[in-house]
Amino acid sequence: MASLTIRKLDDAVKTYLRLRSATNRRSVEEEVRVILRELIEGREEPLTPFAVPPAPSTAAASQRTGALPEASVTLIIGGGIAAYKSLDLIRRLKERRIEVRCVLTKAAQQFVTPLAVSALSHERVYTDLFDPQSEFDAGHIRLARDCDLIVVAPATADLMAKMANGHADDLASAILLATNRKVLLAPAMNPLMWSNAATRRNLALLQRDGAVLIGPNSGEMAEAGEAGVGRMSEAIEIANAAERLLRPPVPRPLAGKRVLITAGPTHEPIDPVRYIANRSSGKQGFAIAAAAQTAGAEVILVSGPVDLDDPPGVTVKHVESARQMLEQVQTALPADIAIFAAAVADWRVANEGEQKLKKTSAGMPPLQLVENPDILATISKLTDKRPPLVIGFAAETEHLIDNAKAKLARKGCDWIVANDVSPATGVMGGDRNTVHLLSRTNGAKDGEIAVDSWPVMTKEQVATELVAHIVRSATDKSLETAP
Ligand code: C5P
């Protein structure tokens, strides 16, 4: 069987093959096999134009709905053989819902055509600094600033030299000089050019100016028999680097931690239609659940009856009474952190009526109350499955700090979030909260209780602040992952 050395083919065929294989996401070798098969079956495609695949569905959908794309990139394609990989890069970026507008240098057009680039990007392609069509509204300034990131791929030695020295004699360099956006460079050049002192100087300047580099990789060069550092990174590597810059990973400091939260009121039945309740809205507990989830924790929220949507990504157990809440809390253990924000009814009716109580001439029916289980105290006093950090709430209408300190001792928890819920504050059912964090483990000397008073905040801000305190304490040895 004969073998085929791609490098020995003439330039037009090589370029076509590279374009076509990149477009069809096949290796060049695989593409050659497809072409031969098509030829034998008598259904070969003409050499130009090559087939352009449909746009990825997410981008198409966003175009259809008119929804704003999540991020946008100006992609400057420099003149080098690696330019063929930039066609694949366009697709990779669009797959990630990144809108791409492309600029081709004069040299780049020797390797890829504006038509191919525009077909893949679904946008017009920019090639000229003095293009009356785009320059009437300062096109190069728009390309430089109406994007979230500029990617230069391939970043040739020449383009990097121009950028390092502030040249602006063509569209690509003018954009690079006019931009206030981050620039990601994917260098591609011959290993000797890469190691040349001039390139090293330019590179040092560019990095000092804030440009970010991806690659180059080492490997075989397009030039016969040459190998070394200088190959442009693969499209997928460049797209990943661009995405990291556009959408930096959200810190998830509570990843691997299991957080159990109670929220809302409880309803204690009197008979099948009546119950004892309180004014708790559940907003604070739900906000804490959402904040802990955002911080990466696995969150189980045991909620009494509330009028709130379940926070996304949180496991919610809906209950009615205090006893049901305790049961769900016990089932959810072990946990690393337990936060008891629910306004649990202290008492329930001992003799709950099986039928609706009737008005009688004998007057009001006697309601005998019995104490509910104290969930916070029960869990704080566990010996085996006690979470390493147990946080309670103290909603008080008078002597806030003194009552909260007494509660911390009585319940046996580690922290108390104390808040004034007297009617004038509007905390109950409202959106804002003024809290004090009392802790035994947080900066307090032995036997002392530290009181950290926070300014008035939204319940979401209180939640974020509380989670930030938990994260800081999680670095303590005392808070280790539950078994
Ligand atoms: O005793 P008091 O109701 O003021 O205590 C408030 C704290 O105790 C809150 O954290 C609340 O969630 C918790 N609690 C509980 N079970 C009860 C009563 C209160 O978990 N039965």
Image (tube, rainbow, N blue to C red):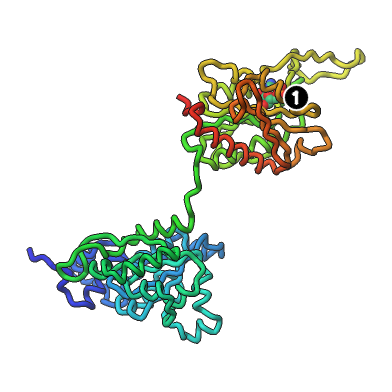
The spot of residue 389 in percent (x, y) is: 56, 27
Q: Quadrant of the N terminus?
A: bottom left
Report the number of discs.
1
Q: Is mark 1 within 8 Å of ligand 1?
A: no
**Closest to the observer: 87 or 79?**
79
Res. 319 visible in picture: no
Say which residue label 1 marks.
402
**Residue at the outermost left position:** 1
Q: Is residue 88 left or right of residue 68?
A: left
Instruction: Reply above or below: 444 against 455.
Output: above
Q: Secondary structure at mark 1?
A: helix
Corner quadrant of residue 397:
top right
In the image, residue 450 sits, relative to residue 19, either above or below, namely: above
Whether residue 308 is visible here, answered yes or no, is yes
x then y, percent, for residue 2: 8, 66
Query: Observer-nearest residue: 427 or 194?
Result: 194
At horizontal 45% and vertical 69% (from top left) the residue drawn is 74
x%, y% of residue 181?
Answer: 50, 66
- Quarter where residue 153 is shown: bottom left
Percent x, y of residue 199 = 31, 70
Q: Residue at x 39, y 60 (%)?
A: 239
Nearer to us in this view, 92 or 387:
387
Asked if 436 appears above or below 446 in the picture, the reply is below
Query: Which residue is painted at 64% across and 41% down in the image?
Result: 309
Q: Is residue 100 left or right of residue 434?
A: left
- In the picture, which quadrant includes the C terminus? top left
Instruction: Classify the position of ligand 1 by quadrant: top left, top right, bottom left or bottom right.
Output: top right
Q: Amino acid at mark 1?
A: Asp
Residue in view at x 27 percent, y 76 percent: 46
